[in-house]
Amino acid sequence: MRTFFVFLALLREAVAFAPQSAFSTARSDTRLFEGTNSNDMMPLKKGSTVALITPFTDDGKIDFPGLEKLVDSHLQGGTDNLCVLGTTAEAAVMTMDERAQVLTTIVNIAKGKVPLLVGTGTINPDSVKAMTQQAIDLGADASLIVNPYYVKPPQRALITHFTQMADLGLPVILYNVPGRTGSSIADETIVTLSEHENIVGIKDATGDLSRLASLKKLLGERDADFLKYSGDDGTTDDFVLQGGDGCISVTANLVPRQMREMIHAGLAGDTDAVKRLNAPLVPLHNNLFCESNPIPTKWAAKRIGLINSAYCRPPLCEMDPKFAGMVEDALRSGSLL
């Protein structure tokens, strides 16, 4: 019996000192849970991140061959990061088993080729933890966590919420989208959270460019290492030119290469190139939101042959035909028709 307990003690020591990735070690002493992919995590990049849609069949099942085709198109198009299982992916109406199947499909194609940012945010903290742990176990590189919607937590509660999720050990991108959540993450709260070793950036979908300047000033020395992504396609060009680090984009579903070129021109400070490259994309930035996202984007993706069905799961539906003309005009502007 004594030999058995000695063996257990040695086993615990071996697990405790298992090697971590350079990225994890540099940012945190927190060990990820059993099933971790910490040795294989890729740090998120500056540049163009697609908020990936999930293709369904006409009867509402996940179209896995279609999903593989979409992921491959982004690998070929040079997309810098993949954001999967977010709002645009309709993840809120997926089961945990479906989430696992989607993430496993994407990991099998893209792991190690492009960083994988996985949406794990919702209202219930226990659900956020469960989805984040699943993402860790299945190969995610980071999590995108929205502030809990509808319930409007005060800022001190947001600090507690995001800190608890970051303590799980996976790098976190905060997601501020007050138009959907009903509340905003204050700049001062973001700065406080940036002190956590695993909170590495923010997706700002406010469309308020003045917030970028104020946040950069408040971050001070941490600004250089804290990723700032635009979540508003219509203002992304100016966001990057004013010191942002890239985008998490709906438009990139349709034009991955063009979005990447535009964003990298902005990162290089080439204003003329940004305006030239962005001009034909402006109708897409605008018209893909003629109805609730991702309804128009899925219609457009079907129209140009990227997916086989424009089906959106309830409570969403397919696009009203009255918007077909304006979405087709946007596709023509982007040289997609």
Image: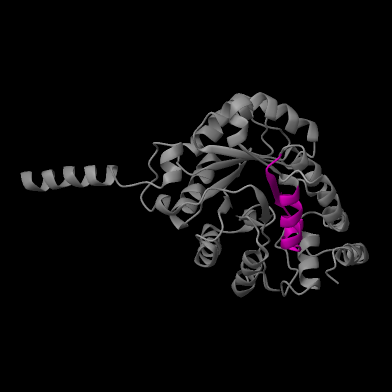
Residue 258 lies in magenta, yes or no? yes
Quarter residue 302 falls in: bottom right
Q: Residue sitting at 75 percent across and 46 percent down?
A: 266
Q: Is residue 40 left or right of residue 144?
A: left
Q: Is residue 197 above or below residue 240?
A: above
Q: Is residue 152 left or right of residue 39?
A: right
Q: Where residue 86 sits: x, y (%)?
A: 64, 52
- Residue 151 can be seen in this image: yes
Considering depth in this image, is 14 or 260 the residue closer to the camera? 260
Q: Where residue 187 sits: x, y (%)?
A: 68, 27
Q: Is residue 134 above or below residue 68?
A: above
Q: Where residue 264 sits: x, y (%)?
A: 71, 51
Q: Is residue 326 above or below residue 132?
A: below
Q: Residue sitting at 68 percent across and 55 percent down?
A: 51
Considering depth in this image, is 144 or 311 the residue closer to the camera? 144
Query: Which residues are the magenta region?
Result: 244-265
- Residue 154 can be seen in this image: no
Considering depth in this image, is 91 or 216 the residue closer to the camera? 216
Q: Is residue 50 left or right of residue 13?
A: right
Residue found at the far left of this picture: 2
Quarter residue 317 falls in: bottom right
Q: Residue sitting at 41 percent across and 47 percent down?
A: 21
Q: Where residue 124 sits: x, y (%)?
A: 56, 41
Number of numbered discs overlaid on the protein picture: 0
Quarter residue 283 falls in: bottom right
Residue 184 lies in magenta, yes or no? no
Q: Residue sitting at 81 percent across and 42 percent down?
A: 238
The quadrant of the rendering that contains the C terminus is bottom right
